[in-house]
Amino acid sequence: GAKASGSNGLRFHQQHAEGDLRSHMRLDHAMRQALASQRFRLHYQPQVDLATGEVVGAEALIRWRDPALGEVPPGRFIPVAEDTGFIIAIGDWVLEQAARQTAAWVAEGRALTVAVNVSALQFHQADFVERVASVLDQHALPPQLLELELTESILVRDADEALERLRALANLGVRLSIDDFGTGYSSLGRLKTCPIHRLKIDRSFIRGLPDDARDAALVRAIVQMGQALGLNVVAEGVETEPQRRFLHEAGCHDFQGFLFAPGMDAVSFSRRFPAAKADAPTVP
Ligand code: C2E
Ligand code: MG
Ligand code: MG
Ligand code: MG
């Protein structure tokens, strides 16, 4: 009857939740081991100027190949790390590693802006600005070569405090972008007051281009709004030539996607995309 199935349902629910919790804890434990055993790596995905075809930057993307679990995608472990708080340790590692690589590229004569994903929890740490400043300092990195990719949720939570922190980061000279733009709840009014340099149009709006009329209209609107606010606009997840052409015609500045290249390790990146002459820092 109803009662029996109700209690079965409850038992099922409990078992399911316990199963989730167990796999959660297992993953958390494995992540801690992975960090300690230096099993995380960063890949770099090129960002390309739509008008010139030049590589203008790279996004650092974390990779984890575990001996027991195999390749674990960030979409699987980052949310768990955000839940357990371990994202703070991962985030520090990513920032340090990306700064080190960016500095190594500078030493090779290549001034490439590297974008790092920052989780909300990481951003809201009391000493986040100091951490960024100290990483720049340690690697003697020109601040404009570091870009922080923030999510809209950062602008929404503790809005005043967040704004103050964004200003402090902008004052350091690092670049700030809004990742997955269009999927969150940030208001246009907030965007106006934030010292943001760039919008990254979420892949979900790019997928339907150029045929889906709604996606096309949304992407045009985002690009125009970005231009009106003086922001750089980059499209993520560009997979086809018609998508690229649409974005170029819409006035979008840069793109990132499998059409050009996926993320790859730093050595492969340097080999496949050698620095243009213009990238070299000018010698006085
Ligand atoms: P995201 O920051 O929006 O990164 C873009 C994701 O789209 C990456 O997935 C990238 O490999 C993928 N991508 C790029 N071009 C294409 C394309 O043309 N087609 C398709 N289908 N996908 C494309 P990835 O590396 O699996 O990362 C997923 C998400 O995990 C990231 O989304 C980001 O939110 C998070 N993440 C990755 N690395 C880090 C990190 O170091 N720290 C933090 N906090 N989050 C990270
Ligand atoms: Mg990103
Ligand atoms: Mg993104
Ligand atoms: Mg995205």
Image (tube, grey):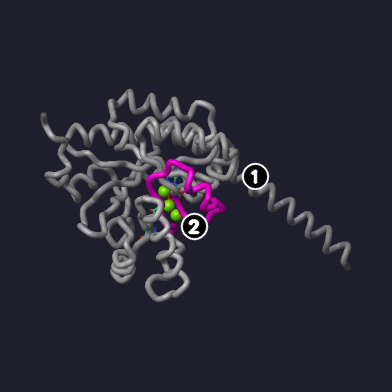
Within-10-Å neighbours for mark 2: few <14, some 14–19, many 20+: some
Measured as percent of width and height from the top left, residue 194 is found at 47, 43
Q: Which residue is mark 1?
A: 21
- Tell me, yes or no, if residue 223 can be seen here: yes
Answer with left or right where residue 205 lies relative to residue 106. right
**Closer to the camera in the image, 252 or 91:** 252
Q: Which residues are magenta?
A: 179-202
- Residue type of the residue flagged with mark 1: Leu
**Closer to the camera in the image, 196 or 125:** 196
Q: Quadrant of residue 38?
A: top left
Answer with left or right where residue 3 lies relative to residue 150. right
Q: Which residue is mark 2?
A: 182
Mark 1 secondary-structure assignment: helix
Residue in the image at 43% along x and 27% along y: 131
Q: Tell me the mark number nearer the camera, choosing from 1 and 2.
A: 2
Residue in the image at 19% along x and 49% along y: 273
Residue in the image at 28% along x and 35% along y: 101
For the N terminus, the quadrant is bottom right
**Closer to the camera in the image, 154 or 37:** 154
Measured as percent of width and height from the top left, residue 20 is found at 64, 49
Residue in the image at 38% along x and 30% along y: 172
Residue 134 numbered mark, or none: none
Residue 188 is a magenta residue: yes
